[in-house]
Image: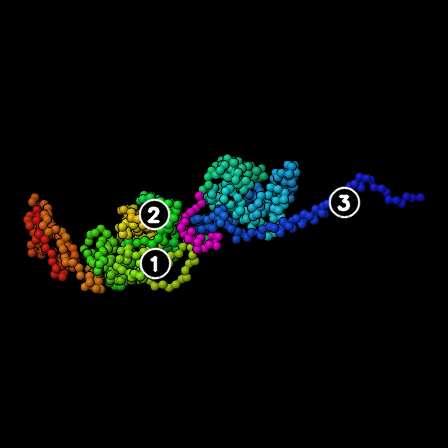
Amino acid sequence: MSDTRPAKSHPWARRLTLAGFTFFVIACAGAIQLNSMIVGIAATLPPTPDIATLPVSVAVTDRDGLLLRPFTTGDGRWRLPVDRTAVDPRFIAMLIAYEDRGFAEHDGIAWSSMLRAAGQFVGAGGRVVSGGSTLTMQVARLIEGEPTRNIWGKLRQMVHADRLEHDLSKDEIIDLYLTLAPYGGNIEGIRAATLAYFGKEPTRLTTAEAALLVALPQSPEARRPDRDPVAAQRSRDMVLDRLVAMGALLEEDAIAAKREPVPSARRDFPMLAAHMAEQAVRAQPTARSVTLTIDKRLQDALEHLAAGRARRIDPKVSVAIVAADIASGEVLASVGSAGLLDTESAGFVDMTNAIRSPGSTLKPLIYGLAFELGLAHPQSMIEDRPTAFGGYVPVNFDGFNRGTVTIHDALTESLNIPAVVVLDAVGPARLVSRLRRAHAEPRLPVDTAPSLAVGLGGVGITLRDLVSVYAAIGNGGMPIQLRDGTRPAPAAEIAPPVLDPIAAWYVSDILADVPPPLNGSPGRIAYKTGTSYGYRDGWAIGFDGKTVIGVWVGRPDGAPVPGLAGITGAAPILFEAFDRLGNRKAPLPRAPQGAVLASNSELPTPLRRFRHPDEDMVARVAAPEIAFPGDGVDVDLGLAAGDISPLMVKVRNGVPPFTFFANGAPFGRPEFARQSLWEPDGPGFVTLSVVDAEGRADTVTVFLN
């Protein structure tokens, strides 16, 4: 009879079956619990950041995208916007080779690395030896800003990495790493790191620089080159050795890279066009980057020029410079002070926008209006003699009068009296109106009408305004509105001219003949200087065929600077600024059709002499007076020794032409001159007389020997 009972299994088989079943049950329960944990972690993850909206330092750049000045983030970090296209590909290749060779294939987690890290974790008694983190996991850690030196933090990092791989492309993950990676202190991101440690953008890096930047984020504080250059070098060399062992770097390249010293200090971040950059950020508070019209090379050159020149003059003196393109109005350089951080000269004050007295810098526009109105020509004669306008009595800067001069010479010599006479003819209100046409904003005392004092600096105006006025003159009289990128460009509009083209050219042609300072060459530029009352402001504004540049020198607090004058303080800086334009230099424009190129004798009779529309008012001046020689003086002409030297007789006041007499006999009648030579027969007394066009006379008696 057969036994139908099932055969008994071996005890070990039963134990294995039971163990397997138990493991299965535990695994299922663990999986259920783990899945619940992962769901819980995922629910608490921060949203995946958009690289386009990630908080970064505002970067102010020049017209070509070159960095002028960055600003820290709200929490004081240097984290500049950057993406992989602006980073040296060699660095990215070294980073991936060293940190995550399987980056292109995995889904955020490299399981082989995780198993290795887990084994090291168990062998070390629960202490993390190596993280096994992928670049994606590192980005997850950087986003959360929390350490992951425990198993639960690592699990959260893995869950977050899976989310990032789902939401972002590999390139976007790299961009996040390049933006967020820590490099010591408040430096985050590759761009901030290369600027801080190497003083350059990350576009081109040496092998040594790239290796150091790969090493730093692993332990940014311990390896900071500005605090421990030895540790920084050791970590850099370790990266180089590992890359060689992996076949990602040639050994000879690594050897050469190890010879390169590591930086031992942080560099300052760029701070060019500092005042304008601040204005741009205030005007566009939500912008991540702002592009200005500034030319970085020119800006840097003019900032160094301003700082150097200011130091030579006085520690409390500042210098401001504005350069602009005449055709477009784009500001190419704007130097607000001799140094933003210079407290002695109040470097924080932007003197390009400070309201100051312009001195004589408005005279070109005064004469331009006379040319436009048909009252004068550059070769018209005008009187430089004491003249009173009610209670206003202008005098020349040096206190002397030249007599009869051409308007050309009156402007090149910056004579005050002829300028005020012409301004009285064209009208101060018209001058102020034309300034406004040039997009300048002259400031007059409240409830005060423009007066003749405006022509000699009795008005408030900024350097930027003056540059705008001279840009219009250089542009054939058409106004040009300066723009710099701090605000959206104004809408194009048809604006009335500041001057007609011929009048503008006449002014430019005269200004090209203004004698240059010692460091300048004549005829290169058309320019004008100015000095405000009390030696508080020195000005020089000029232009060539493409560029207009304005220079201001003085103390921001408005205190006098003894000896300060536009020709000695500002003009040398102006000519040096034009030297730094490089290939932007261009000759002044040629005469437009209709310009009259003639000497005084060739002009139509009405233009040979400037005549004030109210000629009677101008004629109401003091009677003529013999200014030299004085009455009752002895004049040594060497006559006692037998020499015969002529006597120069000079007259002031009165109305030309003048007739000169010696002992009752006329000896000269120059048409408009205020001086004449007389040759005496020998020593002795002589009576000298002069009679003006109004019949008024003056007489002196002198002794000649």
The disc, 2 or 3, on the residue closer to the chain's N-terminal end is 3
Looking at the image, residue 281 sits to the left or right of residue 101; the answer is left
In the structure shown, which secondary structural element does the residue marked by tag 1 occupy? loop
Mark 1: give few (<14), some (14-19) or many (20+) Cα within 10 Å.
some
Q: Which numbered tag is attached to residue 318?
A: 2
Q: Which residue is mark 3?
A: 21
Q: Is residue 503 visible?
A: no
Residue carrying label 1: 441
Left or right position of 192 against 300: right
Q: Residue at x 50, y 35 (%)?
A: 230
Tag shown at residue 313: none
**Is 285 included in the stretch rendered in magenta?**
yes
Q: Where is residue 400 drawn, in percent x and y?
A: 20, 52
Q: Residue at x 39, y 45 (%)?
A: 341
- Which sits earlier in the primary sequence, circle 1 or circle 3? 3
Magenta residue span: 268-289
> What amino acid type is highlighted by mark number 3?
Phe
Q: Nearer the viewer, residue 358 or 647?
A: 358
In screen coordinates, is 198 left or right of 578?
Answer: right
Residue 537 at what x, y percent from top left?
30, 50
Residue type highlighted by circle 2:
Ser
Question: Could you tell me if the residues under marks 1 and 3 are in contact, i.e. CB atoms within 8 Å?
Answer: no
Q: CA distance from mark 2 to mark 3?
A: 87 Å
Give the residue type that dot 1 points to. Answer: Glu
Q: Is residue 366 above or below residue 179?
A: below
Nearer the observer, 419 or 599: 419
> Which sits in the foreground, 248 or 30?
30
Quarter placement of the N terminus:
top right
Is disc 3 placed on a helix, strand or loop?
helix
Q: CA distance from mark 1 to mark 3?
A: 91 Å
Task: Tell me which numbered mark, 2 or 1, is placed earlier along the sequence.
Answer: 2
Q: Count the marks.
A: 3
